[in-house]
Image (tube, helix red, strand yellow):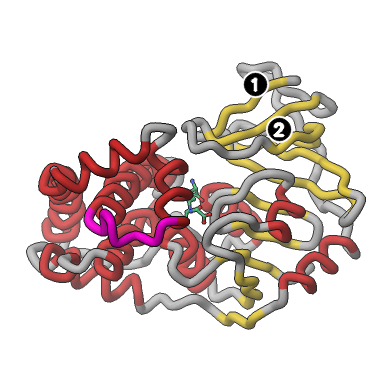
Amino acid sequence: MERIILHNYPQSPVAEKVRLGMGLKKLDWSSVMIPRIPPKPDLVALTGGYRRTPVMQIGADIYCDSQCILRELERRFPQPTYFPNHSQGLGWGISRWGEEIFKQSVKLVLGAAGEDLPVEFARDRGRLYFGPNWQNQLRDINKDLHKVVAQIRSHLGWVDQRLAVTGDDYIFGSLPGLADLELYYFVWFIRGRWEKGPEFLSEFESLVAWERRVSAIGHGQVSDMAADDALETARDSQPQQAFLSEDLDPQGLMPGMKISVIADVDGGETHTVGIISSVGKDVVSIMRYSDQLGDLCVHFPKVGYRIDII
Ligand SMILES: N[C@@H](CCC(=O)N[C@@H](CS)C(=O)NCC(=O)O)C(=O)O
């Protein structure tokens, strides 16, 4: 099998979720550093438009979004599983809860920084996370930060309570899994990027003890790779994706159809366009041809994305 390549940068909390996912499965992988703000020409050459962090590449297969990445890692490397104690299904449900808390955490960290955010970073992330009216929204959040803190405090209280009443080391028992990764990355973000984070988190004793255990999972065996080498790997490989279809697909998506895919929030992002090679209940995979890199297969999760037949 081709090497696992993760396009990411150190400060990204969603990338931290995936790096821990590599660690949980004790994987050996390569890390390509990408810019924190666009332009990201090398990344977009692979994805065809998607610009978020992280993106996983295996040969000429490109996996967008942590949901799609972790699903593929579980498929290729089933042991140790992300779903201890029969937590399949529920683990993904918890990932959507985690996404809600992550959104609140972004409000908290960016809102607290207010005018201190570097201008280019504020403009990019403001538009990405808060839409066209981001300046007013960020100003309002900054004024009313305690309201965001109150939201997050309730959510974290629930996680803390679960850990306290079970007395377990992890969300689903004695082994870590997807649910732990999905509830950890914004705790890492709040602790590291909000100056009052450590004090705020100290209220949650069981959560803090669990946080240490999850952090100790580590990142597996990682080595650095240059972006050019990742592009060369894509150029020298052929996509490995099977051609699958889904009779009950509610949108009638079928292999051979031309579609565009984009996150279903208005973050001012770019569509990725291609021909469906495979469609399942949770993932859609599209083939695209690039003069620079040849045939690529780009994989997206369905939940959280808008797919249009064009
Ligand atoms: N739903 C996506 C969210 C990814 C996301 O929002 N990542 C942040 C970094 S933590 C991002 O892309 N920020 C803008 C950027 O890196 O350009 C996933 O789970 O992968």
Residue 253, percent from left and from top? 71, 22
| Magenta stretch: includes residue 118 | yes
**Vertical placement of 174 versus 125: above or below?**
below
Question: Which residue does the image show at 20% across and 53% down from the upper left?
Answer: 159
In the rendered structure, which disc, 1 or 2, sits on the residue that comes first in sequence? 1
**Vertical placement of 77 versus 309: above or below?**
below
Label 2: state its secondary structure: strand
**Vertical placement of 70 versus 20: above or below?**
above
Left or right of 65: which side holds 149? left
Nearer to us in this view, 258 or 87: 258
Residue occupying the far left of the picture? 203
Crowding around mark 1 (Cα neighbors within 10 Å: few <14, some 14 to 19, many 20+) is: few
Residues shaded magenta: 112-119
**Vertical placement of 252 versus 136: above or below?**
above
Residue 201, percent from left and from top? 15, 64
- Mark carried by residue 249: 1
Q: Cβ–Cβ below 8 Å for labels 1 and 2?
A: yes
- Asked if residue 284 shows in the view, the reply is yes
Quadrant where the image shows the N terminus: bottom right
